[in-house]
Amino acid sequence: MSRFIPAGSYQKTASHINSNLYGKARRRDQSWIASGFNISSLSGGLVNYDGALQSENDSLPVTGFIPNGSYQQTTENIAVALTAYCQKRDGSWQWASLDITSYKQGDGDIANIDGELKIQK
């Protein structure tokens, strides 16, 4: 998995696992626009190009699950959501999401609890 997909027991009973970054990005005309980027396979950082987040080369080490990059200077309310299609106890599947903006691996295991992503301490 990528560096922006946290490890956890949820991976045994989940599919279509993704990490998505969201925020409000400033455009050249100084207006703000909701913007996002699927960081699941991102290998570098991000840049804000007139309100659209795009990948850029960046070899700096990442702490947590927020990518490095110049976008942080012109993007506010940055959040990262882990999403996955999770199996429930009855065998059915449902979409689930978990805010991992401030999550660190030592915070506990991310688990699939009856179709919901939860941090188990």
Image (cartoon, grey):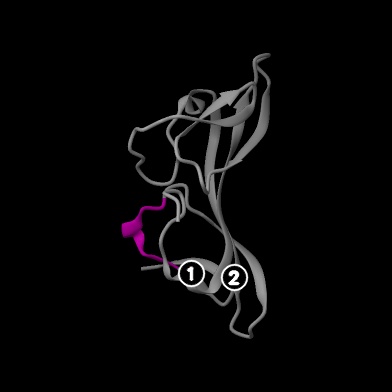
Label 1 Cα neighbours within 10 Å, binned few <14 / some 14-19 / many ≥20: many
Is residue 100 magenta-colored?
Answer: no
- Is there a contact, CB below 8 Å, between mark 2 and mark 1? yes
Q: Residue at x 59, y 36 (%)?
A: 23
Q: Which residues are magenta?
A: 103-110
Towards the viewer: 118 or 52? 52
Q: Give residue 16's position: percent from left, percent from top.
A: 60, 61
Which image quadrant for residue 76?
top right
Q: Regarding mark 2 in the picture, which secondary structure is present there?
A: strand
Q: Which residue type does callout 2 highlight? A: Cys
Q: Nearer the viewer, residue 10 or 72?
A: 10
Front residue of 66/14: it is: 14
- Left/right of residue 30 with respect to residue 69 in the rendered view: right
The magenta stretch spans residue 107: yes
Residue 53, numbered circle: none
Q: Name the amino acid, label 1.
A: Tyr
Q: Earlier in the sequence, mark 2 or mark 1?
A: 1
Of residues 90 and 32, the one nearer the viewer is 90
Q: Which residue is mark 2?
A: 86
Q: CA distance from mark 2 to mark 1?
A: 8 Å
Percent of width and height locating residue 64 = 38, 46
Residue positioned 45% across, 49% down in the render = 4
Identity of the residue furthest to the top in this view: 29
Q: Which residue is mark 1?
A: 10
Seen at 57% across and 77% down, the residue is 114
Q: Secondary structure at mark 1?
A: helix
Placement of the C terminus among the 4 image quadrants: bottom left
